[in-house]
Amino acid sequence: MSIIDKYEVKSIQRSICKEWCLKKHYAKRLPPISYSLGLFENNILQGIITFGIPVSSTLRGLWKNKYKVMELNRLVINDNLPKNSLSYFVSTSLKKLPKPLVIVSYSDTSQGHNGYIYQATNWYYTGLSAEFKDYYVKGMEHLHHTTIHDLSRGKENRLQWLKQKFGDNLIMVDRPRKHRYFYFLGNKKQVKEMKQMNPYNILQYPKGENKRYDASYNPNIQTQLF
């Protein structure tokens, strides 16, 4: 049986993605989700993919508000699926998104990821993300830097509030750089213009040993909800 005959890609409720993001994906965080799709085998959910508004306002403005920018921010499937299941899932999901659209996604070098799924589905590689430092709290390293920053939301001086709350335990560490990929959705004219407006150089795909993270967790929500 072919991959096309075996699987179906359908839109799913954002709530279905929560457990997959928090417990199965290595980041263990729920990202902003504008579009979410599932990979189904006989109505059994085998994977999820989500797209949301990028956190970076700079990135969102690169196409001068003419073209909307979305980030593919979560992609996770069950282990031991047939070869090419992931590439079929990604390519089919892209076809189901509204057009025109600029899609960006990142592969985390700290996790040993090179973005081979984006290379297999013909994305454009534009190098590594910029160097940044992020705030972390000693003893609370499991908290993402955005979670720590959000603790000070609404405070007049957010940085000062964090320093007063955590003292010397508030530290700055280098943010792991990520491989950055783009995919352009639209008709021929729109895709051509998106490429012309792209401020990044198109580079050769990075290579290297790819590490897999533990995705063996089995979510409770496995079937499509109607």
Image (cartoon, rainbow, N blue to C red):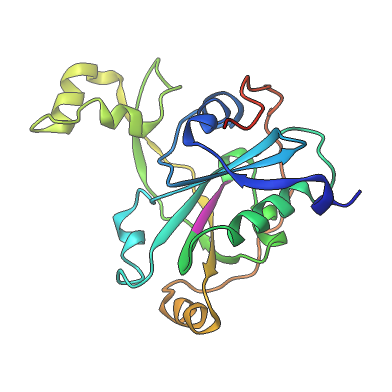
Judge by depth and name the residue closer to the eye, 67 or 142: 67
Q: Give the vertical position of 204 relative to 166 (above or below).
A: below
Q: Residue furthest right?
A: 1
Q: At which x and y percent is residue 136?
A: 35, 28
Q: At which x and y percent is residue 5?
A: 83, 50
> Mostly what secondary structure, the magenta segment?
strand
Q: Give the vertical position of 176 relative to 219 (above or below).
A: below
Judge by depth and name the residue closer to the eye, 23 or 135: 23
What is the span of residues highlighted in magenta in the rendered image?
Answer: 104-108
Q: Give the vertical position of 214 relative to 82 (above or below).
A: above
- Per the image, is 224 magenta? no
Locate residue 162 relative to residue 15 in the image: left or right: left
| Residue name at image x 27 percent, y 31 percent | 149
Q: At which x and y percent is residue 188?
A: 55, 82
Q: At which x and y percent is residue 113?
A: 64, 46
Q: Residue furthest front?
A: 226
